[in-house]
Amino acid sequence: MSIPETVPTAGRSRARANGWAKSILRFLVIIVTTYLGLLAVTFFIGRVIPIDPVLAVLGDRAPAHVVERTRELMGFNKPLYEQFYIYVRDALTGNFGTSVLTTNPVMADIRRVFPATLELATLGTIIGSLIGVPLGVLAAVKRGSIADQIVRVVGLVGYSVPIFWLALLSLLFFYAKLRWVAYPGRIDIVYEYSFTPITGLYLLDSLWQGQWDVFRDVFRHIILPAGLLGYFSLAYISRMTRSFMLNELSQEYIVAARAKGLSETRIIWGHALRNAAVPLVTVIALSYAGLLEGSVLTETVFAWPGLGLYITNSLQNADMNAVLGGTIVIGSVFIAINILSDLLYRTLDPRTRAR
C-alpha cells in the first residue's frame, strides 16, 4: 500500500512547488514593472517641467559655454533613451544627484529627514488603528443606532475637512490658547544641540538613553501632528472595519455560534473580528503608506523637518534632484508596504495560499 500512496503525494508536492514558483515569478514581475513605471513617470516629469536643471545649478547669468559644458557633463545632451538608462542605473544605486538647496547628496538628505516622517506616520497609524478599529466594531454591532451615526459622522468629517485647515485650528486652540502642546517643530532648541539621536526616531532614542526631559519635550511636539494624522487614518480604518464586520456578522457561522449559546462578546471579538482582521491588515498597511507619502501639508504647517517638508522646500527652490529623489523614495516605500501587506494577507488567509 505504501508505493501507490507515494505517487499521488509526490505529484501534489510537485504541483504545490510549481504553484509557488509561478506565484513568486509573477510577484517579481509585478514589482519590477511597478518600479520601472515609477522611475519612468518621475523621469519624464523631470524632463517636461519648465525648469532647466542646468540653470538651476549655475544660475541665469552663467556664460553660455559654461552652460553647454555643464549640460554635457550632466548628460543632458545625450539621446532620451540613454538619459533614461543612466537615470534608472543611478536610481537603483541610490544616486539621485546633488541637492541645489543644501549642496549635499540627495540620498544623504533623505536619510537625515526620513526618520522624522517615519516617526510621525507610525505614531499616527498607531493612534488611528487603536481608536478606529474599536469604533468600527461598535458601529457594526450597533448598526443604525446613534453610536453608529456618530462614528459615521466622525469618519465623514475626517474625509471632508482639509487637513491644513484643521491643523491651523488645532495650533490656535491647543497651542496658542490652552498651551497643552509645544510650538511647531520637532524638539525644543534647548535640547537640539545637547541631545544626540541614534536612529533618528527621537521618542525611541530619548527612551533608550533615559533622557526623560527630552522624551517629554519631543512628545509635546509630536502629539498634535500625529494626532491629526491619526484622526484621518481613523476615518478610513473605522469605515472599513465597520464594512468588514457587517459582512462577517451576516455569515452563517455567526448564527451557528449564537445557536450554541456563545456570549456576544466572544462572537464579536473572538470570531467576527478575527476573520475581519485578515483584510483589515491590508487596510491599515495602505493607511500607513498613505501617511508616509501624504503628510506634506501636515509637516509644512507644523514645521516638521521630515521628507514632506524637504520636498516642499526643494520644489519652491526648483531643486528637481531633491524633488524627484524624494518622490522615488516615497514611491518605493509605498511599493514595499504593499508587498508586505500582500504577504501578510497570504500568511493570515489560508484560502489565498490554496490558490
Image (spheres, rainbow, N blue to C red):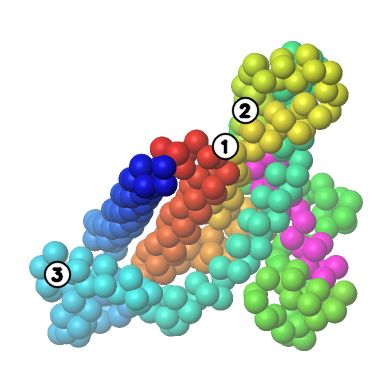
Please state if 224 lies on the left or on the right of 113 as rendered: right
Quadrant hosting residue 280: top right
Q: Which residue is mark 1?
A: 279
Q: Which mark is residue 312?
A: none
Residue 166 image offset from top left, x and y in percent: 69, 42
Residue 84 image offset from top left, x and y in percent: 20, 65
**Observer-nearest of 348 and 261:** 261
Please state if 236 lies on the left or on the right of 127 as rendered: left
Earlier along the polypeptide chain: callout 3 or callout 2? 3
Q: Which residues are magenta?
A: 215-235
* 10 Å crowding of disc 2: few (<14), some (14-19), many (20+): many
Amino acid type, mark 1: Pro
**Residue at horizontal 52 percent and vertical 75 percent from the top:** 111
**Observer-nearest of 24 and 122:** 24
Residue 109 image offset from top left, x and y in percent: 50, 76
Q: Which residue is mark 3?
A: 82
Disc 2 to disc 1, how far (Cα)? Answer: 8 Å
Amino acid type, mark 2: Phe
Q: Are marks 2 and 1 in contact (CB under 8 Å)?
A: yes
Amino acid type, mark 3: Glu
Outermost left residue: 79
Earlier along the polypeptide chain: callout 1 or callout 3? 3
